[in-house]
């Protein structure tokens, strides 16, 4: 199963058509309701200065466009490759500031924090799904190098960006940090265990950052996304622009846990209703002939 299959499986499972082969993790989605709201920290996109990682396509590009539509003053749109920057600038030459940023490169992270010193909102979106073969597993993998790469990209590098930008945001009067996670943090896709591991770890990282910033005027939110039409999901699900607006609505309300995308809330409820039954079903799917 390649990385497109992994995310496509998550997307379809969230929409209720099928369930991807999976094993539940210990990250249990929060119950419905607004207990996680910190309304006093709600962040509006209007006049905001935002840095979005992984902006050149998919969910990240959806965020850029949604922020501009909501009246953001400036959006630092980042991509790993220089050749992707002109298209980003063309979206709005006045307000979009393209930056080269491979989030796994320490020097580039530091340069981004210096260039975007007026930021009051960080959206950690960039991430990877993992390799296309057994290297994404644990026991079947020849080694754990793939798992380490996925964990670096999806957890450690976003944590480093939180460390860099939290002081910047605080110095600029407060704002928000929004980490794009996944419904894959709630259960394990065995053919891509490293992906679920990394997203579960990133969820705990987000909770830790939120705790450390509890007394500061910075809203820290985890975005549990599923069912968004991107290249890696096979273009199935919600339009990334609509997803972006959905997230911005939740951040404006001060939500700390944001369930976004087609069918994401349904999948959360499925996991919560009978976790052991869901776990057993996913294990059986793993061993099915067509798994």
Image: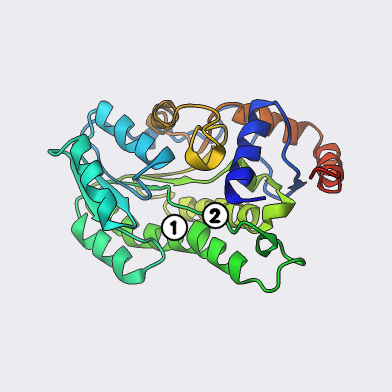
Residue drawn where x is 59% and y is 59% of the image:
131
Residue 85 image point, x, y percent: 24, 49
Which residue position holds label 1? Answer: 158
Up-down relation of residue 204 to residue 50 (above or below) = below
Is disc 1 surrounded by few (<14), some (14 to 19) or many (20+) residues within 10 Å?
Answer: many
Residue closest to the eye, 271 or 79: 79
Q: Which residue is mark 2?
A: 202
Identify the residue at image location x=19%, y=50%. 118
The residues bearing labels 1 and 2 have C-alpha atoms spaced at a distance of: 8 Å
**Which x, y percent locates residue 61?**
35, 39
The answer to whether mark 1 and mark 2 are in CB contact below 8 A is: yes
Quadrant where the image shows the C terminus: top right
**Secondary structure of residue under mark 2:** helix
**81 to 281, vertically: above or below:** below
Residue at position x 38%, y 31% from top? Answer: 248
Instruction: Give the residue at x 66% y 59%.
Output: 133
């Amino acid at each position: 199963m390649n990385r497109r299959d992994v995310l496509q499986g998550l997307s379809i499972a969230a929409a209720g058509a099928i369930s991807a082969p999976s094993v539940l993790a210990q990250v249990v989605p929060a119950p419905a309701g607004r207990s996680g709201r910190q309304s006093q920290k709600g962040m509006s996109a209007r006049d905001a200065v935002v840095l979005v990682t992984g902006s050149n396509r998919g969910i990240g590009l959806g965020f850029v466009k949604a922020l501009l539509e909501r009246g953001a003053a400036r959006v630092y749109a980042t991509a790993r490759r220089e050749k992707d920057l002109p298209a980003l600038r063309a979206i709005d030459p006045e307000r979009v500031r393209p930056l080269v940023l491979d989030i796994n490169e320490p020097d580039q992270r530091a340069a981004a924090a210096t260039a975007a010193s007026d930021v009051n909102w960080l959206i950690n979106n960039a991430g990877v799904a993992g390799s296309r073969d057994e290297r994404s597993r644990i026991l079947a993998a020849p080694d754990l190098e793939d798992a380490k790469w996925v964990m670096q990209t999806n957890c450690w590098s976003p944590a480093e960006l939180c460390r860099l930008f939290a002081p910047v945001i605080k110095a600029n009067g407060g704002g928000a940090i929004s980490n794009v996670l996944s419904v894959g943090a709630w259960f394990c896709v065995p053919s891509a265990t490293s992906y679920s591991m990394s997203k579960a770890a990133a969820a705990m990282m987000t909770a830790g950052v939120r705790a450390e910033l509890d007394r500061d005027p910075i809203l820290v939110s985890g975005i549990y996304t599923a069912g968004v039409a991107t290249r890696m999901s096979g273009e199935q699900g919600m339009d990334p622009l609509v997803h972006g607006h959905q997230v911005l609505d939740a951040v404006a309300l001060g939500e700390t846990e944001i369930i976004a995308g087609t069918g994401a809330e349904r999948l959360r409820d499925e996991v919560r209703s009978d976790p052991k039954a869901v776990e057993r079903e996913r294990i059986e799917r793993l061993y099915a002939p067509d798994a």
